[in-house]
């Protein structure tokens, strides 16, 4: 579908004349003051499984795309739609001043607005190490050792149209809000060790549990039908039938483990 749209746009020629468009809306982004607890350990160097980065960078629009986005009258963040516009060419021609075309680009999730970003530092347990010192006369040392490879998956809290695109938008926003390495999937490799020693007293049993933390993102997604309008010497985007929907997501934090140490008799 995208290739057909790009081809249709590339085949159209028109004269481009200077015109004044509305200013691009500025989106306020209030950063969350999220502090990482001391019990959370960065295992990016120790992790025996190399997690690929799933950061969604802000795609830079071309000059043509910037001009089109300013005409949309709504903030468009969707990187896939921006990429489509970046790959499009509209050639100028003095012979097409009277040309008029309205091209349907599809229904898209256009923007995501965050309402609340929090972190569950013990989202899912992935490991447990025990040391029984009940028969010992001296303190024993307990350290973290991942017994089995563990995969932790996140996801949206409800079914929505264009789920893949919605995830991209929410991932970008949550990454900016938290400055944490997040992904909808992360793995702690077998044999991953953490060099943090816990001393188990005699006649006690020490338990060291490991949890993968996750970001809980809540907000609303805006959908709209997008049209590219070519009329005489003007070109602009028209967005119709806007719909907003509340949405939430759990997004695991990559290469981080929360340690919880407890003692029993």
Image (spheres, helix red, strand yellow):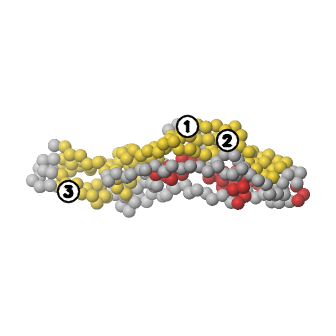
Position in image of residue 241 (x %, y %): 69, 37
Q: Which of 151 and 17 is in front in this view?
A: 17
User: What residue lies at 21% left-to-right and 48% top-to-bottom?
Assistant: 206
**Residue 224 in which image quadrant:** top right
User: What residue lies at 63% left-to-right and 59% top-to-bottom?
Assistant: 60
User: What residue lies at 61% left-to-right and 51% top-to-bottom?
Assistant: 26
- The image shows a total of numbered marks equal to 3
Residue 8: in sight, yes or no?
A: no
Helix, strand, or loop for circle 3? strand
Helix, strand, or loop for circle 1? strand
Question: Label 3: few (<14), some or many (≥20) within 10 Å?
Answer: some
Measured in 3D between alpha carbons, the distance from the residue under mark 2 to the one under mark 1, in whole angstroms, is 15 Å
Question: Label 2: few (<14), some or many (≥20) within 10 Å?
Answer: many
Measured in 3D between alpha carbons, the distance from the residue under mark 3 to the one under mark 2, in whole angstroms, is 59 Å
Position in image of residue 208 (x %, y %): 26, 49
Compared with residue 196, is residue 73 higher up or lower down, i.e. above or below?
above
Q: Which of 142 and 42 is in front in this view?
A: 42
Q: Which of marks 3 and 1 is nearer the N terminus?
A: 3
Measured in 3D between alpha carbons, the distance from the residue under mark 3 to the one under mark 1, in whole angstroms, is 48 Å
Quadrant of the image containing the C terminus: top left
Residue marked by disc 1: 246
Residue marked by disc 3: 141
Residue marked by disc 2: 224
């Amino acid at each position: 579908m995208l290739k057909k749209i790009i081809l249709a746009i590339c085949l159209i020629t028109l004269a481009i004349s200077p015109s004044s468009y509305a200013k691009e809306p500025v989106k306020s982004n209030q950063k969350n003051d999220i502090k990482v607890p001391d019990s959370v350990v960065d295992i990016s160097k120790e992790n025996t499984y190399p997690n690929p980065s799933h950061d969604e960078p802000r795609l830079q629009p071309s000059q043509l795309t910037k001009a089109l986005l300013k005409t949309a009258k709504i903030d468009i963040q969707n990187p896939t739609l921006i990429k489509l516009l970046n790959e499009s060419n509209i050639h100028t021609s003095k012979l097409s001043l009277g040309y008029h075309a309205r091209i349907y680009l599809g229904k898209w999730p256009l923007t995501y607005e965050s309402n609340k970003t929090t972190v569950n530092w013990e989202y899912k347990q992935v490991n447990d190490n025990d040391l029984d010192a009940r028969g010992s006369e001296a303190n024993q040392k307990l350290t973290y050792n991942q017994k089995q490879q563990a995969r932790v998956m996140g996801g949206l809290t409800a079914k929505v149209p264009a789920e893949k695109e919605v995830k991209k938008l929410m991932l970008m926003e949550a990454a900016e809000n938290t400055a944490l390495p997040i992904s909808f999937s992360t793995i702690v490799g077998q044999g991953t060790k953490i060099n943090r020693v816990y001393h188990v007293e005699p006649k006690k049993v020490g338990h060291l549990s490991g949890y993968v933390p996750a970001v809980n993102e809540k907000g609303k997604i805006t959908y709209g039908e997008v049209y590219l309008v070519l009329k005489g010497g003007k070109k602009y985007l028209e967005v119709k039938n806007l719909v907003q929907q509340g949405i939430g997501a759990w997004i695991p934090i990559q290469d981080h483990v929360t340690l919880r140490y407890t003692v029993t008799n």
